[in-house]
Image (cartoon, coloured by chain):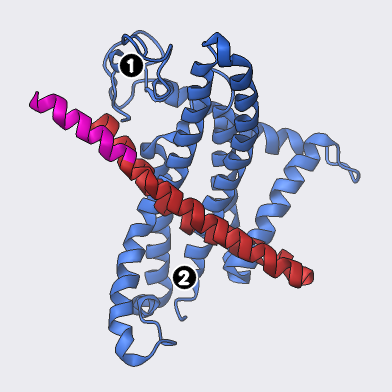
Chain colours: A blue, B red
Amino acid sequence: MASEAPSEAHGAEDGGLVFHPMDQFIVKPLFGDGDIGVFTITNVTLWMGLAILAVVGIMVLGTRKRAIVPGRGQSIAEMAYGFIYKMVEDVAGKDGVKFFPYIMTLFMFIVCANFLGLLPMAFTTTSHIAVTAILAMAVFLTVTILGFALHGFGFLKVFWISAAPLPLRPILALIEVISYFVRPVSHSIRLAGNMMAGHAVIKVFAAFAAIAVISPLSVLAITAIYALEVLVSFIQAYVFAILTCVYLKDALHPHH
Amino acid sequence: MEEALVTGLAYAGAGLACTGMGGAAIGVGHVVGNYLSGALRNPSAAAGQTATMFIGIAFAEALGIFSFLVALLLMFAV
């Protein structure tokens, strides 16, 4: 889907909606309309850069004037920091705290990319599996390498559930191995699927708004769905971060 | 004729795949409902289990997202 050419837009087709709900996810070059190579600057590059700028803006500008009674910007930065710190400590344990910078970065980037995608005419970078798969593969590789580095082959105990009865253990080990390797897939598709589905639904209702009879209803529906999408954008970033913590805990303590 | 049949059946399959999302909805509702009934019985323990609830929601929801993905693949990729 990520490699769709601009000419594949569906909006111009006869008899369809005014614009196609999936057209917003097309990757276009920002300057001119040539082929998309590895280093072409596309709208994905633009919105990803804006997301990074937003993270830097929130954290740097928020903590520039540190006051005992925090202002609005400082409150946001402090709340985000405290929220993620507590989550890492609760889920991954005390020794998982050294991975806090990584998880904080992941969370802030995903939440900013999701929220920026909600702006009208914006592009949602996290709706592309190419983007989320990289994030999820990075987590998967980190966890696997960390597990083997810390425990050697003892890390394989994560598949051997000693709490289960002995005859069941080989079967459970097989299921655990499968579920371990499905992790990056589900981790990335959950985020991309949620973002894509939510934004497509907004656009479907936006297309209905062009039909005069149902447009008031449609505008109400867009408002409600937009509110839901703000919630979903935050929760999906949270879920991505919390699952990273759960996987990290497996690498730090492979004994069940 | 052959091609039209394949396209039509692909769309029918996409529609059928969406029923899987209903299953995910039931699963998520089950997780949150049970969390809420537990939280109302013992409100002091509820705050500590919110993270667990979200993990449960994420796992239940992932399978619904998979069916959504199958629908999208049938509509746009096949």
Q: Say which quadrant the N terminus of chain A sits in.
A: top left
Circle 2 residue: A250
**What secondary structure prevails in the magenta region?**
helix
Which residue is nearer to you in this view: A116 or B44?
Answer: B44
Quadrant of the image occupied by residue A75? top right
Disc 1 residue type (three-letter): His
Q: Residue at x 60, y 32 (%)?
A: A225
Q: Earlier in the sequence, mark 1 or mark 2?
A: 1
Residue B17's spot in the image, x, y percent?
Answer: 33, 44
Magenta-span inclusion, residue B7: yes
Note whether A83 is above or below B40 in the view shown.
above
Residue placed furthest toward the right: A69
Q: Residues within 10 Å of mark 2 (few under 14, many from 20)?
A: some
Side of A235 where A129 appears, left or right: left
Residue placed furthest toward the bottom: A166
The chain letter under disc 2 is: A
The span picked out in magenta is B1-15
